[in-house]
Amino acid sequence: MSASASASANPVGVPVQHHHNVFVYGSLLADDVVKVLLKRVPPSSSAILHSFHRFSIKGRVYPAILPVENKKVTGKVLFGITNPELDILDTFEDVEYERRTVEVSLMGRKEKTHYKGLFSYQALETSFPLVPNLPDMKKDSSEKLQAHTYVWSDKNDPNLYGVWDFEEWKRVHKNDFIKMTTGFVEELEQPESKPRVATYESFYNQDGQNPPSS
C-alpha cells in the first residue's frame, strides 16, 4: 500500500499502526517466552533462513546466528508484530544482537480466509487469530518473505561453537529462561530498568552460580 493510500484509509490525527514480520530461531520459538514478553502469542508460520548458521554460545543458553554459506536455520515467522512490540524485542535482544531484514522461506500448508478486510490462516495444527497483512500463500507451497531477525553482533566471537538445539533447550533450560524473562519484563516497568544482558547474568549468577555453558 502506498503512503498516500495508507493515509487516506486512516482518519486525520490517527497514527498508522505498522505491523512487522519477525523471524525467530531460539528461545522465542517457545510460545511461553513470547507470551511473557508480548502478553500474547502472535500468529506464526514455520520458516527457513538460508545461508545462516545457528551457533551455541559459551556462557549463554540461547543461540546466535551468523551468515554461513550452504547452511540454513529453521525457525518461524511471527506475524503482525506492532511497533511497541518490536521495541520490546529490540530491548530483549539488547546489544548482543543487531536487527536485520532478511528473506525467509515460509513452509507448510496454509489456507487463507478473508473476513472484513482481515486475513486469518488455518494451519494444519493451529488456527491463527485475525491479523492484517498476512502473506497470501497457496496450499502446499512455500513463499519467500521479508522479515526482521536478530543477528549476533560479533561475527568473530570466539565463544560461538557447534549447533544450538531447541529440543535440548526446552528440556534443560526453558523453565528457568521463562523465569528470567519474567524478571526482564518486570524490570521494563521500572523507571530505570537494567539491560536484558544484565538481567540474564544476574538471574543465572544468583547463589554464586555461573550462567550455563550451553
Image (cartoon, rainbow, N blue to C red):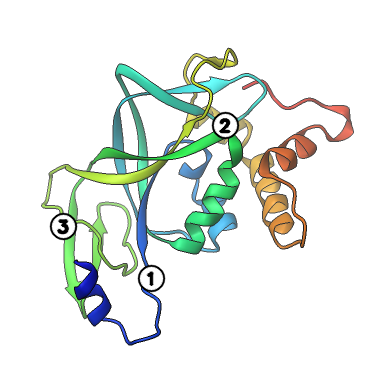
- Secondary structure beneath dot 3 equals loop
Eyeballing the image, is 76 above or below 71?
below
Mark 3 surroundings within 10 Å by alpha-carbon count, few (fewer than 14), some (14 through 19), many (20 or more):
few
Q: Position of residue 74 (x, y in %)?
A: 35, 32
- Determine the secondary structure under disc 1: loop
Counting other residues with Cα less than 10 Å from the Cα at mark 2, is it few (<14), some (14-19), or many (20 or more)? many
Q: Could you tell me the amino acid type at mark 3? A: Asp
Q: Is residue 207 left or right of residue 164?
A: right
Residue 56 screen position, x and y as percent: 54, 21
Query: How far apart are the alpha carbons under marks 1 and 3?
Result: 20 Å
Q: Earlier in the sequence, mark 2 or mark 1?
A: 1
Give the label on residue 62, or none.
Answer: 2
Above or below: residue 153 compared with residue 36: above
Disc 1 marks which residue? 17
Secondary-structure class at tag 2: loop
- Mark number, residue 136: 3
Residue at left 49%, top 23%?
164
Residues under labels 2 and 3: Cα distance? 32 Å
- Relative depth, front residue between 95 and 56: 95
Query: As shown in the figure, which amino acid type bears the numbered disc 1?
Result: Gln
